[in-house]
Image (cartoon, rainbow, N blue to C red):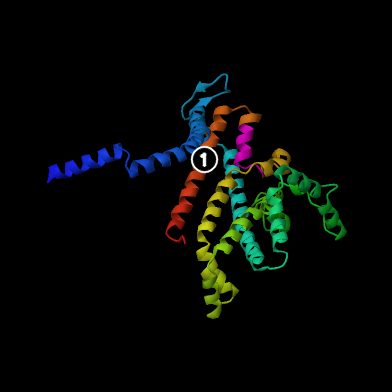
Amino acid sequence: MHIHELTGRCDRAVSWMAGGPARGEAIAAFILLAPALLILIAFTAVPFLGAIALSLQQGRYDALTYVGLKNYADVLTNGDFWNSVLVTFYYLIGVVPATLLLGFFAAYALHRVTRFQHFLRTLYFLPYITPIVAAAMIWRALLNTELGLVNHLFETMGWAPQQWLLEARGLLHLLLPDRFAPGFGPSLSLCCVMIFDVWHNTGFVVVLFLAGFTALPRELEEAARIDGAGTVALIRHVYLPLLAPIIVFLLIVGTAGAFQAFNSFYALTYGGNQTLGSTDNLMLYLYRSFYEYGRWGYGSTVAVILSAFIAALSWIQWRAARNRVYAA
């Protein structure tokens, strides 16, 4: 019995070595994946390993000294670092759910509209394809403290003008000063950044949800309507379950993007130099560590910890949704 089993394995090995179907498929797959794999190794794996090596050293690139895990201890005991983590989580909680909700309902409305459909779809996608720095400059002009259109409208309606992108006090304190301290919750300047990024990113979400709506089986919707299901029931029992893979994808991508947000923060808040740390997210803190303070090892440590945050949250989200998402 053992001899026959060994003979069979040898025959299969010889067949594969001779160029059987399995070997051909494996070679074809490797050839097709090789370019992407090489790019991934060259521009992701190698720089990440370099960042880990740099995080164990101190100083600039021309005068590095090995310090072991000292940078990690310095980062994890630094109050400014934890403030940047808090700002990033404020941003994450404020931007990702709002973008998903607005994108979903905008896509549903565009899916139902029959007239001017292509024009409206293009209109929703325009903010996303607009260069983010150019769009931020326009928002900065609108929210300018002295000459901005928004403050001019506030004064016309008898309301007090605001500092907007320069305001470090919390939004809740400005609305209810007797109940909330100035440093409680996200600042008004951070809320302005959140609103800008929701406006800028919603178009991308709309396009993906529209593709999902277009691919849904029409028979399910018609059957649900025949059974008396209204709009709310359709969304809850038909659309959301079938669009769950898209929702999970957008949630994971949106979370990773929230931790890596930089352009809007830097362009809107003048680098965050006038907001007393209330808009210093992790990426802005990382940027300052590298380019303003010249702490290469410290900045690399922040980058490694940031990567660990993103990987951990993505894994948690995937594990939580894996058994609840059903692919068509």
Q: Does any portion of residue 196 appear in the rendered image?
A: no
Residue type, label 1: Ser
Q: Which residues are magenta?
A: 279-289
Q: Residue at x 69, y 40 (%)?
A: 266
Q: Say which residue appears at 61% left-offset and 50% top-offset.
A: 90
**Residue 94: quarter of image:** bottom right
Tell me the chief SS of the magenta region.
helix
**Which of 258/207 is in front?**
207
70 left or right of 278? left
Q: Secondary structure at mark 1?
A: helix
Q: Give residue 207's position: percent from left, percent from top.
A: 62, 56
Q: Is residue 227 above or below residue 80?
A: below
Q: Quadrant of residue 80?
A: top right
Looking at the image, which residue is at 77% across and 44% down? 137
**Residue at the farthest right position:** 156
Q: Is residue 288 magenta?
A: yes
Image x and y of residue 286, in percent:
60, 36
Residue 266 magenta-drawn? no
Label 1: how many Cα within 10 Å (few below 14, some 14–19, many 20+): some
Q: Is residue 193 above or below residue 307?
A: below
